[in-house]
Image (cartoon, helix red, strand yellow):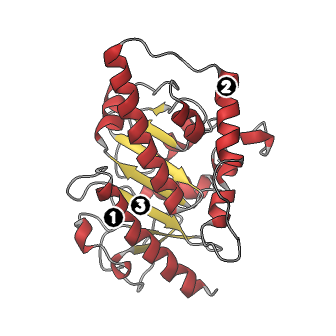
Amino acid sequence: MSLGEDILRVRRDVAKLHEQLTRYSLVIWTGGNISGRVPGADLFVIKPSGVEYDDLTPDNMILCDLDGVVIPGSEGSERSPSSDTAAHAYVYRNMPHVAGVVHTHSSYATAWAARGEAIPCVITGQADEFGGEIPVGPFAIIGDESIGKAIVETLSGHRSRAVLMQNHGVFTIGSSPRDAVKAAVMAEDVARTVHLSLQLGTPIPIPQDKIDALFNRYQNVYGQGADPATDTDSQADSATDAVTGAAAGQTDPTNPSGVTA
């Protein structure tokens, strides 16, 4: 596949995946964004700033380099990219295994972020998906790479694909844009369920060895698998361990997050 074809595919994927953010009530109005890395190139595609979700199309997605600079003359380049572009760019520069980034202000996850509190691992679905707690990063200013730096630093050493940014919202990473969207959906579900549990009493923590076993099973055994020759998401799905850290001992134990900064 040529570079032009790869860019078009990522444009289509990123534009289409924004429908999932509204489907699962993770965003309101024009808030939130998805980006996707262009394979084999120092480029990514991201949502334009302030455009309503019903108006998002492949040709108004914005192509940027890994410094967050819009590629002149590319489709959509007359528009301004998302206000979080610098954060996405920082993640792509410093986490080369990441191919998708999502940001939302989903209600329950953002409520935890407003408290500056990590979400403890007290349900098996969270152990499956995130391999432990969903961590919280520090307050950071919107518009420059401060948020991206905080994301990378907070997820270093974590298997979680989600991070709560204090007083702001949630960012998720993935081995594809679709994988990052799934993480955003699951992070909100976890945030809601654990919140409800706290209203009823004191949740029971899951022991670390059980978390490890659940995570390993879900990441390496669960599901039907796919034919790499026919499933466009197969490489992304098989790369989940790289994104989530030291799953099943398959990554460098001294650098489980894959951060290169």
The residue tagged with tag 1: helix, strand or loop? helix
First in sequence: mark 3 vs mark 1: 1
Count all numbered tags in the image, as a single digit.
3
- Under tag 2, what secondary structure? helix
Position in image of residue 174 (x %, y %): 56, 54
Farthest top residue?
202
Looking at the rendered structure, the kind of residue marked 2 is Lys
Towards the viewer: 40 or 162: 162
Q: Neighbour class for label 3 at 10 Å: few (<14), some, many (≥20)? A: many
Other residues around mark 1 within 10 Å, as few (<14) / some (14–19) / many (≥20): some
The answer to whether the residue labelled 3 contacts the one labelled 1, judged by CB atoms less than 8 Å apart, is no
Q: Which residue is painted at 31% across and 44% down in the image?
A: 106
Of labels 1 and 2, earlier in sequence is 1
Residue 40 vertical position relative to residue 114 in the rendered view, above or below: below
Q: Which mark is residue 19?
A: 1
At 50% from the left and 74% from the top, the residue drawn is 10
Residue ranking furthest to the left: 29
Closer to the camera in the image, 196 or 161: 196
Of badges 1 and 2, the one in the foreground is 2
Circle 3 sits on which residue? 34
Of the residues shown, which amino acid type is indicated by label 3?
Ile
Residue 38 picture location, percent across and down: 56, 72
> Which residue occupies 53% across, 56% down?
179
Classify mark 3: helix, strand or loop: strand
Where, by quadrant of the figure, is residue 116 drawn? top left
